Image: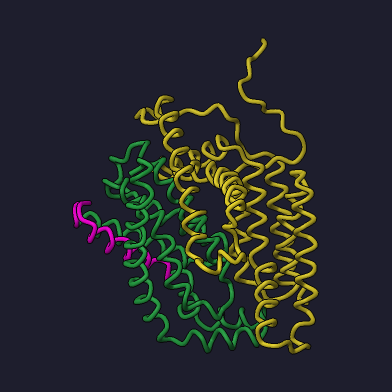
Chain colours: A green, B yellow
Amino acid sequence: MEKSNKLTGKDLINVGIYTAMTLVIFFVIGLLTALPVVYPFLFIIWPVVCGIPMMLYYTKIKKIGMLTITGIISGIFFYLIGYGWIGLVGWILGGILSDLVLKAGHYQSFKVTALSYACFCLGIMGCPANLWLAGESYWENIHSSMGDQYASTLQSLMPSWMLYVGFALLFVGGILGALLGRKMLKKHFERAGIV
Amino acid sequence: MEQLQAVASTKKGLYLDPRTKLLLMAVVATAEFLYNHTAFMIAVALIPFVLLLTNRQYKTAITFFVLFTTGLVVQAVQNNIQFPMVINMIIVLLVGLVLRLFPAFMMGAYFIKSTTASECVASLGRMHIGRQITIPLSVLFRFIPTMQEESAAIKDAMRMREVQFGTQKFWNNPTALIEYRFIPLMISVVKIGEDLSAAALTRGLDNPVKRTNITKIGFTLWDVLTLLMVAVMLFLTFFVIKW
């Protein structure tokens, strides 16, 4: 955290606002599409829709550390609602990675922003990664708590290569989300005088 | 000598330190992974239930109780009956959601209702967590209710234009729902946020001096009793009573 010493109060309030917005939207979409059949599509839907608030957020970011804090807070949130330490680590890593990418690109071009957001989206993988990384005990848990039929469906939908496909989908979704977010910024927010 | 009090510190009944609440939240969230028999599940669910009752959130507590009991009953019978694929999926998912995640949600509901923002900030400060985390967190807690209010207002307004889930207009153009609901919400939230940061800055948020806080927090007998009871209950149900 020593890098973020320069963050002012205004930056920190911005972090709070946009983290709240992104988390709520993320959570609502997650609940709307809670069937396991749509799990693979979530990898695209999440980054695309969350692209709108995140692009607005990116217009406020001029210092390193803000995305890391967003990652930490989101990670704690997902730990508390039951994704375990893998969810926590995933979000924090995504936040740090996107911060570094943005820092390397000097906060200037849209390309860097899109790339950074795509990296941030990779952190989302922390949530479903339990399915592969937490091992057999997690599956036994699902078998006992959700019933055998659910578990076998989930298992057939989520073979081990899905882990890598998931990363790819999230990355593509991140780029698409950044494009959608920029379109929305141009269409609505610049007209409303917010950006 | 008469003392002037800026904070009403006369809390009646069971009152817990925010740090205890955070610990209990972490315990409930972690316990969700350890579910292996019904007694333990009930014990975990009892924690938020009792806490909600002590905070007089009766409506939430009763809803939780009804949902959780239904979930337990459905889970007990679900492996004996074969439903069609899709219905089974939905039922299983709802039951899983209720049994597994609702205790943590209810802890969250209790935490947010029973803790004021300054108590939260004070206790996080005692835990030596820097302002990089405490300020965004307190803003986050302040904003989630605001977003709910704004969202409800926008929903009412949009109903006039039939922008809601399930209408003919929605199916013609589903992305309109995102555009017409999220974007006004985001704009109003950003505006409120700008006002908030202006207000906070005039009150010296950027002052480098260590902030003080007059809110009284501290561990009391209640914290010890609650933690002891929770520990005994969880230990007994996890290791001793297995059914």
Foreground residue among A81 and A13: A13
Decide if residue A4 is in sight here. Answer: yes
- Does residue A54 sit above or below B10 in this rendering? below
Residue B5 falls in which quadrant of the image? top right
Tell me the residue at 40%/46% (across/down).
A15
* Magenta segment includes A7: no
Image quadrant holding the C terminus of chain B, namely bottom right
Residue B201 falls in which quadrant of the image? top left
Foreground residue among B111 and A108: A108
Tell me the residue at 74%/86% (across/down).
B79
Magenta stretch in the rendered image: A105-125
Label count reads 0
Q: Position of residue B221 (x, y in %)?
A: 71, 41
Decide if residue B20 is in sight here. Answer: no
Q: Position of residue A98 (x, y in %)?
A: 30, 60
Image quadrant holding the N terminus of chain B, namely top right
* Magenta segment includes A123: yes
- Apparent side of residue A126 relative to residue B7 in the rendered image (left or right): left
Q: Main secondary structure of the magenta part?
A: helix
- Apparent side of residue A42 relative to residue B51 in the rendered image (left or right): left
- Does residue B157 sit above or below B85 in this rendering? above
Q: Position of residue B158 (x, y in %)?
A: 57, 51
Q: Position of residue A84 (x, y in %)?
A: 52, 67
Foreground residue among B185 and A149: B185
Tell me the residue at 32%/57% (across/down).
A182
Tell me the residue at 75%/59% (across/down).
B64
